Image (cartoon, coloured by chain):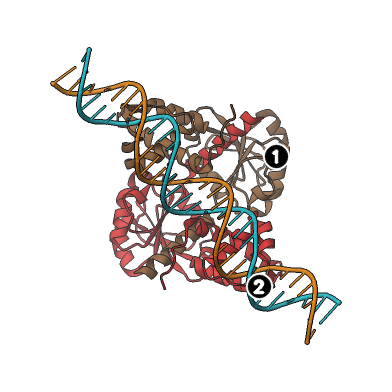
Chain colours: A red, B brown, C orange, D cyan
Amino acid sequence: MPEKKISTAVIRRMPKYYKYVNQLLDSGITRISSSKLAEMMGLTASQVRQDFNCFGGFGQQGYGYNVEFLRDEIANILNINKKNKAIIIGVGNLGRTLINNFNFSACGVQIVCGFDVNVEGHGNTINNVPIYNVSELETVMQNEVPDLAVLTLPKRLAKTMTARLIECGIKAIWNFTNVDLHLDFDCIPIEDVHFSESLMTLTYRLKEKQNKK
Amino acid sequence: MPEKKISTAVIRRMPKYYKYVNQLLDSGITRISSSKLAEMMGLTASQVRQDFNCFGGFGQQGYGYNVEFLRDEIANILNINKKNKAIIIGVGNLGRTLINNFNFSACGVQIVCGFDVNVEGHGNTINNVPIYNVSELETVMQNEVPDLAVLTLPKRLAKTMTARLIECGIKAIWNFTNVDLHLDFDCIPIEDVHFSESLMTLTYRLKEKQNKK
DNA sequence: TTTTTTATGTTAAATTGATGACATAATCGG
DNA sequence: CCGATTATGTCATCAATTTAACATAAAAAA
């Protein structure tokens, strides 16, 4: 069968569903209707059903959705049931913060090691994650074979590092630099976290709000 | 005249335009056509013109757009020419990282102070930003009158803190907690930075890529 | 067992967003 | 100064996304 392409709009909602379905599970709720879930999440029931049906639909008429089944299905769709291996490039402030605080495993990701320019010798670790000098990138990647890279290095290094990573066979990039890498590298999926763009949309809405008052 | 509502899709592109127009300025280019700009950014010329025309259009037939004028116009639209006062709630790892490394002023934002639960006495600063105990929130806000708050605290505290901030007259929130605050608080603009949702869309695309191979 | 209610999956309509087409105006070269 | 070219602003079309409608099936109630 010709797999129909799932729109990014739908994909972007899946992690939200996952979050709310987990909340339901935690509070002991075992079944849920599209309308109840929609109300919780501020969506329409129609959209919830439409979204789930993109993946075949996992509900039953007259009953609704089994919460546990739903959770497992969404986890599978999002590919967060397995341990995707990741490396982190640049362990300055942001990189370190992610290693220490971000719950990678909840996203099906395991940080196997980090790289930085200012690392001497061996034995360096942050939160049990070994940190290597970036000169060892190629060697380490041959042994570890990571799936994705977290880019938390200075923006001026972003493009050359991306080229290098792709050369080494990286399959996806989580990009925290303010550089639009997808323009130069469209061969692998790249997901951006652009703080300044996010903040600027907020300052825009702030002004709008103030004008209306 | 009845101001036509600008779609969020357009707004989300404005910071991107701003970035590229600044790059042009830095390389000494004084005029640009929609087609050149579109090519740089991976958009269509039509969309570029359509977007700018939402705000009245600042080009000239046969000439294109004056880069400096464009920059100033976009900066005005985004409201990043002034110094919007901000406070930061929670100076753990992420909050500290933002204070130390993020270029707030490039987004027209000035961090006036931070708050945390584990702060004793006076005189605490991070990168010249004074840090107060969260018990002093109401007092300090009366003097400083900040426009927006950066939420970098544990998620369990997010809702009550948001209520408190709105009570004190905050006008916008940049939300780094994995809580959908807009569902409970729709009276002010709230912009989310949801790391896990971002990463999960990437693991999804990673799987898609691998299946296709 | 039968009826009523609930609630999905799916198709159709409406809305929103992006692209293409083009008339028109300003620039540039001769 | 004038024709050719460039390139905008705008309107019309096309595509994508969201919402609404409804037939149908399972569950719950009687």
Q: Amino acid at mark 2?
A: Gln
Looking at the image, is mark 2 or mark 1 nearer the viewer? 2
Image spot of residue A45 (x, y percent) = 64, 60
Left or right: D16 as drawn, with respect to B189: left
Label 2 CA crowd tier, 10 Å (few <14, some 14–19, many 20+): few
Q: Quadrant of residue D7?
A: top left
Image spot of residue A4 (x, y percent) = 44, 66
Q: Which mark is residue B166?
A: 1
Image spot of residue B43 (x, y percent) = 37, 44
Circle 2 is placed at which residue position?
Answer: A61
Q: Secondary structure at mark 1?
A: helix
Between residue B94 and residue A7, name the one nearer to us.
A7
The chain to which mark 2 is attached is A
In the image, is residue B188 above or below residue A36? above
Image spot of residue A203 (x, y percent) = 55, 35
Q: Same chain for the residues at labels 2 and 1, yes or no? A: no
Q: Amino acid at mark 1?
A: Ile
Between residue A184 and residue D18, name the one nearer to us.
D18
In the image, is residue B103 above or below residue A64? above
Label 1 CA crowd tier, 10 Å (few <14, some 14–19, many 20+): some
Residue at horizontal 65%, vertical 47%? B182
Q: Is residue A18 in sight in this rendering?
A: no
Tell me the quarter of the image containing the N terminus of chain B: top right
Q: How many marks?
A: 2
In the image, is residue B112 above or below residue C20? above
The chain to which mark 1 is attached is B
